[in-house]
Structure formats: structure tokens, C-alpha cells
Amino acid sequence: MKAFSELFTNIDETTSTNEKIDALVAYFAKADPQDAIWCVALLSGRRPKRTVKTNELWEWSGELSGLPVWLQAESYHIVGDLAETISLILPKNTSTNDYALHEIIETIAELANKDEPQRKEYITGMWQQLDQQELFVFNKLITGGFRVGVSDKIIIKALAKHYHIDENIVAHRLTGSWEARNNTLTSLLSSESSATDISKPYPFYLAYPLEVAPAELGAVDEWFIERKYDGIRGQVIVRDNTLFAWSRGEDLLTEKFVEFKDLVQSLPNGTVIDGEMLPMKDGAYLPFHVMQTRIGRKNVTKKALQEAPLVMVCYDLLEHNGTDIRHLSLAERRKMLEDLLNAVKTIQPELPLHISPLVNCTTWDEVTAERLRSREYNCEGLMLKRKTSEYKTGRRRGDWWKWKVDPLSIDGVLIYAQRGRGRRADLYTDYTFGVWDGDTLVPFCKAYSGLTDKEMAEADAWIKKHTLEKFGPVRTVTPELVFEIGFEGINPSPRHKSGVALRFPRILRWRKDKATADANTKEDLLTLLKIYTTGTGT
Amino acid sequence: MITFDNCGIYCAQAGIYIDPWKPVAKAIITHAHSDHARAGMGAYMAHEQAVPVMKFRLGDDINVQGLSYNEEVIINGVRISLHPAGHIWGSAQVRLEYKGEVWVVSGDYKLQQDGISTPFEPVKCHSFITESTFGLPVYQFPDVDEVHADINTWWQKNKAEDKNSVLFAYALGKAQRVIQHLDSSIGQIYTHGAIDNINKIYESTVGVLPGTKRIDQSVNRKEIKGAMIIAPPSAMDTPWLRTLQPYRSGICSGWMQLRGTRRRRGTDRGFILSDHADWPQLNTAVQETGAQNVYVTHGYKSIYSRWLQTNYGLNATEVETLYTGEALDDNLDKPGDESVQ
């Protein structure tokens, strides 16, 4: 635990990617093998199940620190992190006891089957031994969610460096579902374990936003232009007569996405298709809020199946007849994908697999015009892919670009503010905005990001001086500041006073040049709603 | 005896303000930081160590009377004396007594000993005015010796990698404190001009500091290697700073206790080092005064007053002031200001 806690501190104290990699490599070199694999699991977001309730943590830490509940709550609002708050208010320890990371994690997991006094005994016992940094890490292990500024890329680079394995291979072997318990990195990264895990997806190749004028990309005919669909990017895998459907977030969705279950009979073994999973009805792709009705639920109802039947828009073929073909050119892969889909759909025309149609353009001007039509297709923009590109690992520049449409925007008035979390803790950075409905401002969205650090500090100081009322962590402020809010889509929502829900709202600009009277109205929102939800079947 | 008005903390009987923020005839100044010692007062009274800094910052021609600690001045029957506040060198608490009633205005203070300032002394009183910059139980600062050691280790490590170490610290107080505890056997210590100005005043008023070199035109930037440079926060992101590359930067502040503040600090390292009282120090200070009435100023004042009421049964009141406590940046309000103004 001390070694892992030190690693955590070292990573937290630097913003340099190389120093983070070095810290990880140094840790892998000395850590207990069972601890090291847990380290990778935790940093890559594979967190263990919660076994202790938040209320219990407050109650027990209150007893040890002698602080009343209201003061714990105030502290939490300001620190913005449960694990950190508790680690800061507990009495300081000087013990030098050290425990193996994997033992701690396993003990915490076993608490699920223990009664309250036993859970309390273990947790408070540890709280009275660990030093402050360890306490924080320990509390994070209990509460889950290790966000420490280590991307998958950093983990992959560190593992590649330590084990002298190619980064792409490491990336592949880290994908999918694997257990840290009773496992080691050596075995996870070995070729044998990869070969036996038939569920393993390939690491996704991701595009950066287009940074230059498209004309600078060269001749149009060197590129495949496709639409950027707004669903869940995923891989469908058929191996050994078994189907696996993975999301890009590496959630296994096979059980939830029942529409795909017949694919196991249709697709040959050793097939991996990359595509977008999204609902389609009467020949039209449905907007993301319809997709959401399918993601959140454990059990798929008949109604949901009828209203949001899923298909996969197929972008790419990664494995064909059991062979990894990612090194072939996109033109070759796409040809094989088309042939495969044609063959299976001749037998089964209803199969929920569609090739992602190419947007045929002969000039970049035509491409530019097609991009502007994206919302008509419920799409986010265009994808530009070089025909000669191989299928790479992770987010890369050069061969694949996403070219999204500009967001829709509306001017709203800041009406409520709440303290942020993490990096924005103790600053009022979470805002609710309102639009005019007659003489009153109705809230229409919340936004958390888009301001620079400087603007955030300025807004924070302003909010503290212009607070009308406080409700717990939320403050009502004098309606004075106008912000331009950008969003990707707009959908009807009976739950919201404004009648709409926005997709990906964020602050585009602080409109210091505008007075509140210049802000938009609820009518304006409803007009946008009308324009952008026609023809989608909802 | 003491009231709060729109000019500051006022003692009508003596006709004198303490740390006023608008021009008044007579002012007692607890310490020379700019949110407490402002220009434009007809006459000033302050601790003798604070006088040269005030003259330097507010003008040589100010009318100022220097007092030593415990020295008593009687104005219209009010007995006034200054007592060590431990905040920075020359910082004082103001004790005012009239007809047996005692008030203490503490300004900014800390109980931690920094090796530079005369240590804080508790003063018995009926009414105590306290700051609350770090008046939240999550602020429990680490041992100062450990932090000083961390700073030296950091310097050594940067030096080993051929990098300079730039530490941002307030010119008055924090800078001298930090320099005092640097291990000059590691390398050369340089100062920004703003720091050096105050260092010179410190050395002529209080005592000797480890040797430092002012970075001026005579210094060849190429000779600054593996050095420690002390600069004010206003030097962040300036061309001046860029001439010191390659460097790692650090900041010393109580706000570094929180991970969120640490992560958005804009420097490579954050050291938890403050000239203000943390939660246990505030509680100790308040209890040791024996005061029944506590007036809580700048900081987490609503939370801290509620704590004093509910935990110690004191008459605790929030007071609006224009003091800013500890800022990470010269231009910004400090992140924790709870005030609803």
C-alpha cells in the first residue's frame, strides 16, 4: 500500500507525461505482481464493487473525528471529494504498518458479506493506521473512481517500456474484460492468455477533430467520406460460435443488445466488425436520446425493443476468417466488409447490419456542403478516412479525422451556481442557465465546462459577491451574466421546465457584451426543437 | 467599545480605527500586508518592525508611530497595546481596554512557529476578533519542519536534473520565512527585485537571512543553474520568468492542502505552508483568549461562527470586512472566500 500510495503521489504531483510513465515503470519494477495488476486495473477504470455505504463512512468518520454531521457536509461541499474529505478530517496516524494492495482490495470486497459491526471494525481499524496519503488512496478504494490524470495511453506506454512489448500489443491485451484477482501482468500480457480469450476486442482507432482546411488534406479521391453517426461506437465479435458486442467504453453489451443475437449464426467465426450501434426505425436513424432508453436498462422491455430497435452501421472489418487484418488498407478492408455483408444479407436480408454509406464527393466544396446537411441525417458531422490507412490503436492524427458540424447555440442567463468537483473543487463552476419565458427565467441546461481557468476564477469571485440565496451547496445569483451555450442536439423533455433537453451543453463564450434582456427565450428553444426533430419519427 | 462600520473596525472612545479600508484620521495597523495597511490615513500606529515596510510601501512621509510589543498607549482612557500575532514579522494583535472591558483584534495570525516572526501570544479578553481563512476542519497543516525539508529535497532533485527551482511567495513575510529555511549548501539562492527590496528591510530591521543574489542586469542568466529563485506570484507567466528556463516551479500556500487547488495551481509543485492559522490553531487561539464574544472575519466565516456557537457555546458573529486572507494570485480573491457581499 505504501508503494502504491507513493506512486499515486508521484503521478499527482506532475503534469508531465514522461514523468508519469517513469513513475509507473518504477512502480512495476518493485511492486508485488498481484499489486501491480491491481494498479493497472484501478488506473484503467476497472474498479471493484462498492461494499460500504457512504452514510456509514460519514457516521464512522464523524465518530473518530468528533465532528458534527453538518460540518462534515460543509467540508465535503468545499473539498468536492468524499474520499479526500474523510482522509483530511480523520485524526493523524503515525503507524508504519504496511499492507499489500491486493489484500486490502480483496478484504474490502469481502465486506459485502459481512455485517455492519464487522465492516466498521475493519474500516475504522485501517483509518487508525494509515498515513494521510494512504488514507486518501484507501478511501478511494472503498468509494471507487480513481481519476488521477493517467490515460490509457500512459499505462500502455509504461507497460510497453517495462515489459519490452510493442505498445499496440499491450493495448490489445489490455482490452476487454479481465480479472485482476489472482492474476498477474505477466500472464495478462502473455500471448497465450490473449489467444484463449475469445471475447477480446481490438483497441479502437479514434480520430482527432479536423484541424486544417479540408483542401490541405490533398485530393478528395484519396479519402473515404462517411457520416459520423450518433450512437455507441462498438465492435461485434463472432468467434467459436459465440457473439460478443462491446462498446468503445469496453462494456460488454451482448445481453442488452438482443437484436444482434442472430449474428452468431450468420457471421463466420473469426469476424470482428467495428461500427456504430444505434436505433433505426422506418429507414431513419433515431437521435441519441432514443438510444439512451436502451443503454441505461438492465432488462430490455418489449416496448423499448419496438421503439428503439438497434442496428449496426458497419465502418470497418478488423478480423476476417480468424485473421487480424488491421494492417491492410482501409480500401481493402472495406471491400472485404462489403463482400461479407452482401453475402450474409443475401441469405438474411433482415440482418441488423448496414454498411456505412460513402458520401460521394468529387470536390472539397461538395464535402463542405454535405457536412452542413449532417443534422438532416441525425449525424454529428463527417468522418474523413484515408483510403490507404491501416487500422491503428487509440487516438491518432494524420489518416482519420472527424469533422463535426458547429454546435447549435443559445444565449442563457446564469441563475444558479454550484461548487465543482476535483480540479474545480471549491470554485463555483457548475452553472444552471435560464432563458426568458415572459418575465421569468426558466432553467434550460446545466454546463460545467468551457471557461478558461482565469474566467472560472473571475466568475467564482463574482458569484460569491452576487449571491441571493444559498440552498446547501447551490447558490442563486443575481441574473446578470449572459453566456453563449453550445450543444449538439435538442430533444423534447417533459421533465424539464423549459420542455427541452440539450445534448452535450457547454459554455462557448462569456457574453460580457450582452445584457440579460438580450438572452434567448423559451420560444427560441422550442423553435430549434421543431427544426431539428422533424423527420426522425419521434 | 468596538463597532464595525463602512471604514473598518472602529473604537469610538479612542477615535481610532484598526486596519481601516477607507481613509480615516487615526489608524492602528496589525501588519503591513496591503489589505490591512492602506494608504491615506492621517496618522498610523503599528509595531516597530512594520514601520519601515509601511514607509517603503505607503511613502516615507506617512505619520507613523512605532510601538514595541506590550508597550501601552492610553488614548482618551482606552489602554491600547500590541501583542505578537505570529503572522509575519512585525505583525500584531491589538488589545484595547476601557473600564475593565477588553477587546482583542487579531488581524491575521498563526500559532505555528516560522523561525522569523515573534511567536503568537494568547491575550485574555472578553471579545475576540478572529480571521477564518482556513476555518474548516479539512485544513490541518503538516509539520513545518517536514515541509521545509520537502522544499530542500525538491530543490536538490531539480538541481540534479539541471533545472532551476522557482518558488512563488509573497514578498512580505512568506519570502523571508522560506529563505530562512533553505539549505544554502545546495546551491545559490536568487531573488526577484520585489523580494529583495523587502529582504533588505528585514535585514536592517530584524536579522540576517541566508545569502541571496538579486536578479538584476548585472546577473548573467546563463550563470543561474540549479539555483533556487524566490519570486512573487505576480511574476508567474512573465517574460522575466522565461529567462530562467529550464525550471520547475512551486508555490507555498495553505490552499495546497486540497487536491483540487493543488491540481489547478499552475505550478509543478504545491507546498502546504501558510502564515495563517489552520483549524486546530484557530480553535486553540479562540479558547485561550477566554472570550465569550467572538467576531469572525474573512474566510469561512459562516461555518466557523456556527462551529464556535454549537461546539463551544460562544456568542459568535460573522463580520463583513474587506480583508482577503491568503491569495494564490496577487490579483484574485482567495478561492475559499465564503462571503456573501
Image (spheres, grey):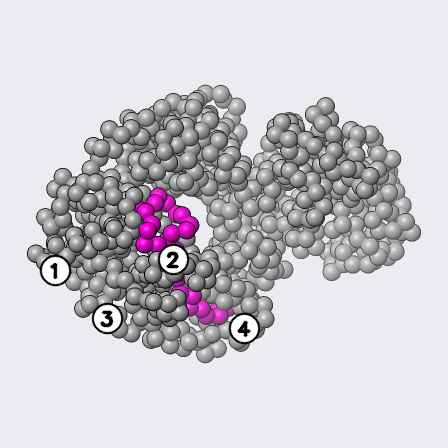
The kind of secondary structure element at disc 4 is helix
Verify whether residue A407 appears in magenta: yes
Check the image and report above or below for B181 versus A153: above
Q: How crowded is mark 4: few (under 14 residues within 10 Å), some or many (20 or more)?
A: some
Verify whether residue A192 appears in magenta: no
- Asked whether, in this view, residue A356 is left or right of residue B37, the answer is left
Amino acid type, callout 3: Gly
Q: Name the residue under label 4.
A: A516
Q: Name the residue at 19% across, 55% down.
A: A338
Q: Do the residues labelled 1 and 2 touch (CB within 8 Å)?
A: no
Q: Name the residue under label 3.
A: A537
Q: Nearer the viewer, residue B88 or B211?
A: B211
Q: Name the residue under label 1.
A: A350
Question: The N terminus of chain A lies in which quarter of the figure?
Answer: top left
Q: Nearer the viewer, residue A366 or A383?
A: A366
| Magenta extent | A386-413
- Sequence-wise, the earlier of marks 1 and 2 is 1
Position of residue A422 measured from the top left corner of the image (x, y, whole percent):
48, 46
